């Protein structure tokens, strides 16, 4: 259920360059060094209010430039009021739901503070807590953390939060989905009472409103994209088939574009690992990322995809947000997500930095209800590429390719499968895909902290 955002409405400022947003010359140099040309809508609308000191609620999808929207003005305000870091303290606290997103935020912030005395420290689970305790001893200016590991450090008295006068909650809806609501409430109670609080979310369910009303003061509301809106440059298609036919069908698609960079999403970590091993056994260079992987393993898999050591990364929704790899050309939903908003975030991993991308869903009969939820959320009937169309599906007629396949883009010398997405599901009854016999279930709340599989 979605309800209206609380908070003051904003009037569009119509500011078209970073200089007009009010940032200092030092930050403008950092912006130029990072190659930013013009502010994105969320940056244009949020930065002036953050500089002013207002609490702010931002409704925007992942990949829209939110990190710079809060990071640039936050760094600007810290530089304008220089202070020595207190032992085990931090001046600003940024919370994010996954290790990957924490690392991505920290990487961007480090580029913003280059050449300044400000320090950025990131804290995530899956790595040595003793090393993190040592790093925090002298304090930091900006601490970026996942909620579970942060509370572990608080319990050990390795970090104090009462020195933080800035609090940022990024991807707040996913933090709630991962069961962090109690952690967020505890952390918010430990941060300085007199503070500036910024909350960013891709969706705005009831619990987010309750969180905002409890911890934000007269917030400005900034909304740059409606919930459920998918990226404009992503071409979406769906193939209908039995669950058992999915694995061989996916292999056919991947083999037709061996040099493409692809993400494949599964619902479970065990299913993702099994699928990755199957792809590797078929000669496809693949890796995996999910909650059973250590932080170092996850980092290596992402680096491998980014640097071309592997071409396919099989993932759970741990990778649906916080991974920014511009070269990803295809996103495959091997299994549809149980939460429809996750579909929007999954396919948002492609068509980044102005590029085009393809989002291909493989839908089994037991997943039809999940597909309907996605189409309702996005207000879009996904084009049918192949398979028996369910009777209740207002099918979009696919454009036929030269070979009469599912109407997908043709490759020169592409063989007899009718293009990458038009590959025939010849292997019905072949190797079983992950969790083939499992019917979709309602998502259950995960326990608090880093023990969550997706954290």
Image (cartoon, helix red, strand yellow):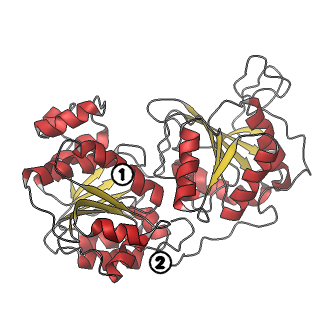
- Mark 1 or mark 2, whichever is nearer to me: 1
Q: Which residue is mark 2?
A: 448
Whether residue 342 can be seen here = no
Q: Kindly indicate the quadrant of the structure image that contains residue 187.
A: bottom left
Task: Estimate the spatial distance between the alpha carbons at disc 1 and disc 2, rounded to whole Å.
Answer: 22 Å
Of labels 1 and 2, earlier in sequence is 1
Structural crowding at the residue carrying mark 2, measured as other residues with C-alpha within 10 Å and reported as few (<14), some (14–19) or many (≥20): some
Horizontally, residue 143 falls left or right of residue 280, namely left
Q: Is residue 290 above or below residue 386?
A: below
Name the foreground residue: 355 vs 452.
452
Name the foreground residue: 317 vs 28.
28
Whole-percent x and y of residue 24?
A: 11, 40
Q: Is residue 273 above or below residue 21?
A: below
Q: Which residue appears farthest toward the right when viewing the image?
A: 429
Horizontally, residue 295 falls left or right of residue 59, namely right
What residue lies at 54% left-to-right and 58% top-to-bottom? Answer: 318
Structural crowding at the residue carrying mark 1, measured as other residues with C-alpha within 10 Å and reported as few (<14), some (14–19) or many (≥20): many
């Amino acid at each position: 259920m979605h309800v209206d955002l609380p908070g003051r409405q904003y009037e569009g400022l119509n500011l078209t360059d970073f200089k007009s947003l009010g940032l200092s010359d030092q930050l403008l140099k950092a912006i130029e060094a990072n190659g930013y040309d013009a502010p994105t809508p969320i940056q244009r609308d949020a930065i002036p209010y953050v500089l002013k000191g207002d609490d702010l609620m931002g409704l925007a999808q992942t990949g829209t430039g939110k990190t710079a929207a809060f990071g640039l003005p936050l760094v600007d305000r810290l530089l304008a009021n220089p202070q020595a870091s207190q032992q085990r303290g931090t001046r600003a606290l940024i919370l994010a739901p996954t290790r990957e997103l924490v690392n991505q935020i920290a990487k961007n912030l480090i580029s913003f503070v280059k050449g300044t005395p400000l320090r950025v420290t990131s804290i995530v689970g899956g790595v040595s807590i003793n090393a993190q305790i040592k790093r925090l001893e002298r304090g930091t200016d900006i601490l970026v953390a996942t909620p579970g590991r942060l509370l572990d450090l608080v319990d050990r008295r390795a970090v104090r939060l009462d020195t933080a006068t800035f609090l940022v909650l990024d991807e707040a809806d996913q933090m709630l989905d991962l069961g962090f609501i109690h952690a967020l409430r505890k952390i918010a109670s430990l941060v300085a009472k007199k503070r500036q609080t910024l909350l960013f979310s891709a969706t705005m369910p009831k619990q987010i409103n309750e969180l905002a009303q409890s911890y934000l003061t007269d917030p400005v509301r900034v909304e740059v994209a409606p919930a459920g809106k998918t990226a404009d440059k992503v071409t979406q298609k769906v193939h209908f088939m039995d669950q058992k036919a999915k694995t061989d069908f996916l292999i056919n698609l991947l083999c037709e574009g061996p040099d493409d960079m692809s993400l494949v999403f599964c619902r479970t970590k065990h299913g993702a690992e099994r699928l990755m091993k199957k792809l590797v056994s078929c000669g496809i260079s693949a890796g995996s990322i999910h909650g059973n992987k250590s932080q170092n393993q996850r980092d290596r898999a992402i680096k491998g995809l980014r640097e071309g050591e592997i071409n396919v990364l099989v993932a759970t929704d741990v990778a649906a947000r916080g991974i920014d790899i511009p070269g990803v050309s295809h996103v495959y939903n091997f299994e549809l997500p149980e939460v429809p908003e996750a579909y929007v975030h999954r396919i948002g991993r492609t068509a980044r930095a102005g590029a085009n991308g393809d989002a291909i869903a493989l839908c089994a009969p037991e997943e039809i209800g999940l597909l309907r939820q996605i189409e309702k959320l996005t207000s879009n009937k996904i084009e049918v590429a192949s398979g028996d169309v369910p009777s209740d599906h207002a099918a979009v007629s696919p454009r036929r390719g030269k070979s009469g396949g599912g109407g997908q883009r043709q490759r020169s010398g592409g063989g007899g499968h009718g293009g990458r997405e038009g590959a025939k599901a010849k292997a019905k009854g072949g190797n079983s895909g992950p969790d083939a016999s499992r019917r979709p279930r309602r998502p259950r709340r995960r326990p608090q902290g880093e023990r969550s599989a997706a954290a």
